[in-house]
């Protein structure tokens, strides 16, 4: 189960990649000439906080201006073709019904304003629709629907996982740190902060359906910071390890075993008395 970036990772895992293979493919992709020359990399560079030489700053400024200008004439900075290349690299060309474990992902139909749950059909297309970040990636047209990021309805779709039959829901919430002392100098700063607050409130509502919530420490990184993927994987591992006891206790089999052990212990006490 996943939405947006979670759909990409979840789809790759459900499609057959092991965790080690996922990490290896992520590292290989980020270092590939294809990624380095892609529009995705250019968008990342334009938002980067790193220090650059003057020539690099000028190049980044021109690219940033070019991509921003494109938003006046098209529904996304990145075309679906640009983003599809990355999706195809990680996601196998199979149907959702063919995944090794049950998989679901969600997207948003911008026409009817409804949440769409994918449980069948092409896996790549479902993941692509769920990853179409509003304004950044061009929405996907399917039939009479125009599909965009599933995160519009909920960044962590715990309620959907529960509705689809999950006995235990382990949610991974990847949130930026919200700085309460940040200065809001422009209308964009205020608008961005307002969007963050609304998203956090919606996320908290969704997380009520989760048994375990894992929150990796991602600091103030944006969704465009692809080059930090390996560091973020490490943070995810740390956060998961910190929750291992909670995860074990939430599993039905573990619960039954612990209950069985308690009954045996209680029976022994009764016999001894």
Image: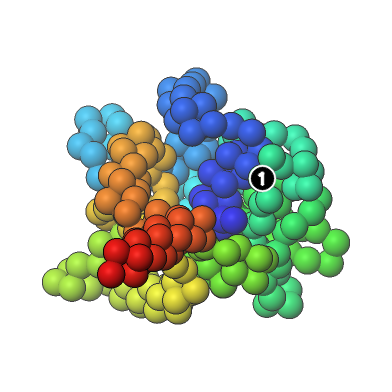
**Can residue 58 be seen from the camera position used here?**
no
Location of residue 90 in the rendering, given as x and y in whole percent from the top left corner: 60, 34
State which quadrant residue 162 falls in.
Answer: bottom right
Q: Quadrant of the N terminus?
A: bottom right
Residue at left 57%, top 72%?
A: 159
Residue at left 28%, top 29%?
A: 55
Badge 1 crowding class, 10 Å Cα cut-off, few under 14, some 14 to 19, many 20 or more, is: few
Location of residue 222 in the rendering, given as x and y in whole percent from the top left corner: 36, 52
Q: Is residue 86 left or right of residue 186?
A: right
Relative to 137, is 52 above or below? above
Residue at left 51%, top 27%?
A: 21
Visual colour scheme = rainbow
Tell which of 116 and 188 is nearer to you. 116
Residue at left 22%, top 73%?
A: 184
Relative to 181, is 51 above or below? above
Identify residue for label 1.
101
Location of residue 141 in the rendering, given as x and y in whole percent from the top left corner: 77, 58
Q: Is residue 181 left or right of residue 261?
A: left
Q: Quadrant of the C terminus?
A: bottom left
């Amino acid at each position: 189960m996943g939405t947006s970036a979670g759909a990409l990772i979840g789809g790759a895992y459900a499609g057959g990649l092991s965790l080690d293979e996922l990490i290896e493919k992520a590292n290989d992709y980020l270092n590939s000439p294809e990624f380095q020359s892609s529009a995705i990399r250019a968008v990342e560079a334009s938002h980067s906080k790193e220090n650059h030489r003057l020539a690099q700053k000028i190049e980044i400024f021109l690219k940033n201006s070019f991509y921003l200008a494109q938003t006046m004439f098209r529904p996304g900075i990145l075309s679906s073709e640009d983003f599809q290349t990355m999706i195809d690299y990680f996601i196998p060309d199979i149907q959702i019904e063919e995944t090794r474990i049950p998989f679901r992902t969600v997207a948003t139909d911008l026409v009817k304003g409804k949440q769409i749950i994918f449980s069948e059909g092409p896996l790549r297309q479902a993941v692509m629709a769920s990853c179409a970040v509003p304004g950044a990636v061009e929405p996907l047209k399917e039939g009479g629907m125009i599909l965009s990021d599933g995160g519009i309805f909920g960044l962590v779709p715990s309620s959907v996982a529960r509705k689809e039959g999950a006995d235990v829901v382990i949610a991974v919430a990847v949130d930026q740190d919200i700085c309460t002392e940040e200065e809001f100098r422009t209308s964009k700063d205020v608008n961005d902060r307002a969007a963050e607050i609304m998203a956090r409130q919606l996320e908290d509502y969704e997380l009520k359906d989760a048994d375990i919530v894992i929150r990796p420490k991602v600091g103030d990184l944006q969704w465009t910071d692809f080059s930090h993927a390996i560091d973020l994987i490490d943070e995810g591992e740390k956060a998961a390890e910190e929750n291992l006891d909670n995860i074990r206790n939430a599993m039905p089999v573990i619960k039954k075993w612990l209950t069985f052990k308690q009954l045996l212990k209680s029976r022994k006490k009764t016999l001894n008395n």
